[in-house]
Image (cartoon, grey):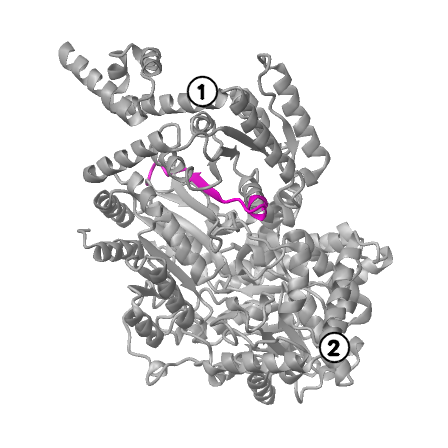
């Protein structure tokens, strides 16, 4: 399985074809819903790695297997990346029921590379749970939403990241909020209040999921079970209302669009009627895998571009 | 009146030499020899398993037993360590931290066994966990419980062992990790305040005992090569400590506010190249902490000239001891009052350092103090940044190190002629220790042991002081690992933040060209070159590994930084799961012979036989040769200070292994 991940990451032309074939097959044959895909995001210093470690250990104690895709930023200047999450997710390494893959965000503007998306696709059929951990710096939240079923935002009390988050208009994205370091007492409770208040202000459709705000302490394990329960409940809610299918579908659409945009730019997408037009086309072509769609729509764009010359 | 009065010569500081290896018996012999040569106090070095609370036969102890210090698994080991040395007439410093409470318990138990009164015992337990989180890496438990253990020891000893220094707040390791003098002062003070606040918060320590507690706080300071600045540094620390203890803890008695400290001089700057130069460095560094009488150290440990090559032999330690003896007995230094009182230059620099340190201290306190600044990685990040700056300065030649990046041509040294100029630890020592440990376990009463462990656990859960039950456990023949396991179950284990920031930085032209090569080979490989950096075994000195990780990131590699305290199996599994192209191991504890071979085997077993391995650390040339024949592609030691060049070689190594052009 590491080989599959290496392959998905491989940019050489001959390998790309193999990787595409593999991912295509996975998309067609992976059982639905398969393993829940859970995103963990939050500002640096929010303690999300430690919290993830606590979640992983709890799940392992229940006999469930876990895969973690840990995404760290790449340096714009050097292209390198320091992927240090593993030392915090301590339970991995000697336990075969935990698999951790560290990935650099690379050059994607949103921060989540193709590799992370492919990684999730490869790991989901094999493990009971797949976590994607990213550093919450705004754009990556929206990107990671398209890869996961449930997005957990980890906030640090009193650190101001909640306010930034709200200001950036990102409050609609997470499905569960975890205020970490609950052992700090009052300041943690205060942050939870702020979040809950901000959430009240948003409009919500009837029957829609109401994101809970939980107090957790990764350090002493308080609230970890409640967090797992909230994640599970969100997953169940989505499945019951067929939102999960829609969400996964939207995620695939995002991936296709992103691929087309990367290859052909705005001008190319304009040949399909822009992003809106492209999405309409995608929704009409039911059943085709994302890779096949990229091929097909890409071919359309190319012939349209040739005609306009 | 004359400034000097030979008749009123001050008594010299305590002469110590940090030592221990192989077994209690071998170390005891060494101690007695050193005492006979004129050493006046002991400084015990424990092996890594003892420091990290595992018994000699634990899997993680493999290759580490008796290497960097003496293995002490139980009270018989402790008694053997001090055979023929009456504890009530010796001054013993123990460099022990996470397991300090246990080792002190063993020491007291031996005293009780041999008829020495515990309240007459003189010495020190280092017992400083914050610097472990920041640089040394031999912590076990998280900050909260660790502070509780520290304050237990202080509260216990202030009455039961009034001549004992329960803690040495260490600024030493901060300098070794790259700290500037201001940082060294500020973080040490922050650390001391965190400890005192923890003790003051205890219900079993009355308010009127606080001045006495303050009086028992002592420090362990570094003395670097910039000895004028170092003189000013210790004067600044004396000033600040006096101020802080008066203002924050209301200590009126000036004697109790005195800045008491011991020293080991800088080891980071000791070179592998032209190692004979190190003797000169050591002498000059000793001056920084002895010249100024008002701020003179109470005890001094001098490393040996060959510390960058390996473990010192008895002769090497003797040579360093002579430095102290000549300085104390042959010169007139101790006949004078303070040499610098009234010096415009020294007093100005002292004030400068004190002011800057006060600012930095205020910053740390504003975050919630030293523990908070550990957990949020602030202090660690500052240290990593200073260290990176130092390495760059040396790489660029801006900071000169004689024999390393300046004046590198020279005659071959006669000191290095012949066989290895280091102590070779007997490999059979580990086996012997394990056998003796097993025999010990079979002789004891299992019921007594179980009862004693329960009592320790009760102390932990009831919040009472852990010392009395630990001393009883020592008498009941509990082992180091067993005691630590009880605490591990209650407190959990901890991994400290690395302090490495996410931002990359462009460096020199050389770095740019290596980056080019990294990008080229990444194209060949199909994805960016991925490197795994980790430390197998129990050695926690992560500074070198961190700098390698940073340098690799800066030339465009994707680096999986695994951290410390890994088993060879964990490293191999990570290498496989992460799909790395090359593995870099860092070991400074002398266990490389065993552990590196284990990693190679585990890599083969995990299907990663084609992943090349490079190793860095304190590795004598003979061992390096053996490692290379075992399959290690490159071995790096302290003389390889040019990290950019190492990065280029890592590209070469991957190219060779993959048979691609680089």
Q: What residue is at 76 percent from the left and 56 percent from the top?
A: B461
Observer-nearest of A70 and B619: A70
Quick one: SS at disc 2?
helix
Q: CA distance from mark 2 to mark 1?
A: 67 Å
x, y (%) of residue A221? 65, 44
Instruction: Classify residue B5 as left or right of residue B581.
Output: right
x, y (%) of residue A138? 47, 27
Q: Quadrant of the C terminus of chain A?
A: top left
Residue A62 drawn in magenta: yes
x, y (%) of residue B571? 42, 57
Which disc number belongs to residue B475?
Answer: 2
x, y (%) of residue B649? 27, 57
Q: Is residue B190 visible?
A: no
Whether pointer 2 and pointer 1 mark residues with C-beta atoms closer than 8 Å, the reply is no
Instruction: Classify residue B486 as left or right of residue B570.
Output: right
Chain letter for the residue marked with disc 2 in the picture = B
Q: What residue is at 45 percent from the left and 67 percent from the top?
A: B588
Give the vertical position of A190 relative to B275 (above or below): above
Residue on which disc 1 sits: A246
User: Which quadrant of the figure has residue A26?
Assistant: top left
Q: Which residues are magenta?
A: A58-78
Q: What residue is at 57 percent from the left and 17 percent from the top?
A: A208
Instruction: Classify residue B565 as left or right of residue B489.
Output: left
Label 2: few (<14), some or many (≥20) within 10 Å? many
Residues indicated by labels 2 and 1 sit on the same polypeptide chain: no
Q: Is residue B442 visible?
A: yes
Chain letter for the residue marked with disc 1 in the picture = A
Give the vertical position of B276 relative to B26 (above or below): above
User: Which quadrant of the figure has residue B335?
Assistant: bottom right
Give the vertical position of A279 relative to B231 (above or below): above
């Amino acid at each position: 399985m590491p080989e599959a991940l290496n392959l998905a990451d491989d940019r050489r032309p001959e390998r790309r074809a193999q990787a595409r074939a593999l991912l295509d097959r996975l998309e067609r044959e992976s059982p639905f819903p398969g393993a829940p895909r859970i995103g963990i995001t939050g500002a640096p210093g929010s303690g999300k790695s430690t919290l993830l470690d606590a979640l992983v250990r709890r799940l392992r104690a229940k006999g469930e297997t876990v895969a973690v895709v840990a995404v760290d930023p790449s340096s714009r200047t050097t292209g390198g990346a320091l992927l240090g999450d593993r030392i915090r997710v301590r339970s991995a390494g000697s336990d075969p029921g935990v698999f951790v893959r560290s990935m650099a965000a690379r050059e994607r503007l949103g921060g989540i590379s193709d590799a992370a998306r492919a990684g999730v696709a490869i790991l989901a059929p094999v493990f009971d749970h797949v976590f994607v951990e990213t550093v919450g710096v705004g754009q990556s939240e929206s990107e990671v939403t398209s890869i996961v079923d449930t997005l957990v935002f980890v906030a640090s009390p009193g650190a101001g990241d909640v306010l930034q988050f709200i200001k950036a208009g990102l409050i609609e994205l997470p499905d569960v909020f975890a205020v970490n370091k609950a052992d700090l007492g009052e300041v943690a409770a205060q942050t939870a209040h702020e979040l809950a208040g901000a959430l009240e202000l948003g409009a919500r459709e009837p029957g829609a999921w109401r994101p809970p705000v939980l107090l957790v302490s990764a350090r002493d394990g308080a609230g970890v079970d409640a967090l797992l329960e909230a994640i599970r409940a969100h997953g169940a809610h989505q499945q019951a209302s067929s939102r999960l299918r829609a969400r996964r579908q939207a995620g695939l659409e995002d991936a296709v669009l992103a691929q087309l945009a990367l290859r052909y730019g705005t001008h190319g997408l304009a040949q399909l009627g822009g992003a809106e037009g492209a999405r309409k086309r995608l929704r009409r072509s039911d059943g085709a895998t994302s890779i096949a769609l990229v091929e097909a729509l890409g071919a359309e764009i190319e012939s349209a571009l040739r005609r306009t010359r | 009146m004359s400034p000097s009065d030979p008749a009123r010569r001050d008594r010299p500081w305590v002469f110590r030499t940090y030592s221990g290896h192989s077994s209690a018996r071998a170390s005891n012999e060494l101690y007695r020899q050193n005492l006979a040569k004129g050493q006046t106090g002991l400084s015990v070095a424990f092996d890594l398993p003892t420091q990290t609370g595992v018994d000699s036969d634990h899997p993680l102890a493999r290759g580490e037993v008796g290497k960097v210090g003496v293995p002490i698994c139980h009270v018989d080991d402790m008694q053997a360590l001090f055979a023929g040395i009456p504890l009530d007439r010796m001054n013993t410093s123990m460099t022990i931290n996470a397991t300090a409470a246990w080792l002190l318990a063993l020491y007291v138990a031996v005293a009780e066994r041999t008829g020495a009164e515990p309240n007459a015992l003189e010495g020190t337990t280092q017992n400083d966990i914050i610097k472990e989180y920041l640089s040394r890496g031999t912590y076990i438990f998280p900050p909260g419980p660790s502070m509780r253990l520290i304050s237990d020891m202080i509260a216990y000893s202030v009455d039961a062992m009034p001549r004992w220094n329960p803690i040495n707040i260490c600024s030493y390791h901060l300098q070794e990790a790259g700290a500037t003098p201001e940082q060294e002062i500020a973080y040490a003070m922050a650390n001391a305040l965190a400890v005192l606040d923890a003790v003051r918060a205890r219900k079993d320590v009355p308010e009127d005992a606080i001045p006495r507690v303050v009086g028992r706080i002592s420090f362990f300071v570094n003395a670097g090569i910039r000895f004028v600045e170092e003189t000013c540094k210790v004067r600044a620390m004396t000033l600040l400590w006096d101020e802080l203890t008066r203002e924050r803890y209301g200590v009126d008695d000036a004697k109790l506010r005195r800045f008491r400290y011991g020293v080991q001089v800088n080891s980071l700057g000791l070179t592998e190249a032209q190692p004979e130069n190190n003797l000169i460095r050591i002498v000059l560094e000793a001056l920084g902490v002895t010249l100024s009488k008002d701020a003179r150290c109470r005890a001094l440990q001098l490393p040996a000239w060959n510390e960058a090559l390996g473990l010192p032999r008895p002769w090497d330690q003797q040579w360093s001891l002579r430095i102290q003896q000549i300085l104390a007995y042959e010169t007139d230094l101790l006949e004078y009052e303070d040499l610098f009182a009234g010096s415009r230059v020294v007093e100005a620099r002292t004030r400068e350092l004190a002011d800057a340190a006060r600012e930095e201290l205020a910053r740390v306190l504003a975050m919630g103090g030293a523990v908070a600044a550990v957990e949020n990685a602030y202090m660690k990040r500052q240290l990593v940044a200073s260290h990176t700056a130092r390495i760059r300065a040396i790489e660029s030649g801006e900071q000169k190190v004689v024999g390393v990046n300046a004046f590198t041509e020279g005659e071959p040294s006669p000191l290095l002629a012949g066989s290895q100029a280091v102590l070779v630890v007997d490999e059979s020592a580990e086996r012997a220790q394990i056998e003796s440990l097993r025999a010990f376990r079979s002789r004891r009463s299992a019921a007594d042991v179980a009862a004693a462990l329960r009592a320790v656990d009760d102390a932990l859960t009831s919040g009472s002081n852990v010392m009395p039950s630990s001393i009883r456990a020592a008498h009941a023949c509990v082992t180091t690992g067993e005691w630590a396991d009880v605490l591990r179950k209650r407190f959990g284990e901890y991994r400290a933040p690395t302090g490495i920031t996410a931002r990359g930085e462009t460096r020199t032209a050389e770095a740019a060209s290596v980056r080019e090569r990294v990008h080229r080979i990444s194209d060949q490989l199909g994805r960016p070159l991925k490197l795994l950096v980790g430390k197998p075994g129990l050695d926690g000195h992560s500074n070198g590994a961190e700098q390698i990780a940073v340098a690799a990131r800066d030339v465009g590699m994707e680096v999986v930084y695994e951290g410390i305290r890994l088993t060879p199996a964990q490293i191999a599994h990570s290498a496989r799961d992460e799909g790395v192209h090359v593995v870099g191991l860092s070991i400074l504890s002398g266990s490389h012979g065993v552990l590196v071979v284990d990693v190679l085997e585990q890599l083969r077993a995990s299907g990663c036989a084609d992943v090349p391995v490079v190793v860095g650390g304190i590795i004598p040339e003979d061992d390096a040769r053996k490692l290379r024949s075992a399959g290690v592609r490159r071995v790096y030691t302290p003389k390889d200070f040019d990290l950019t060049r190492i990065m280029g070689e890592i590209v070469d190594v991957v190219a060779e292994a993959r048979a691609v052009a680089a």
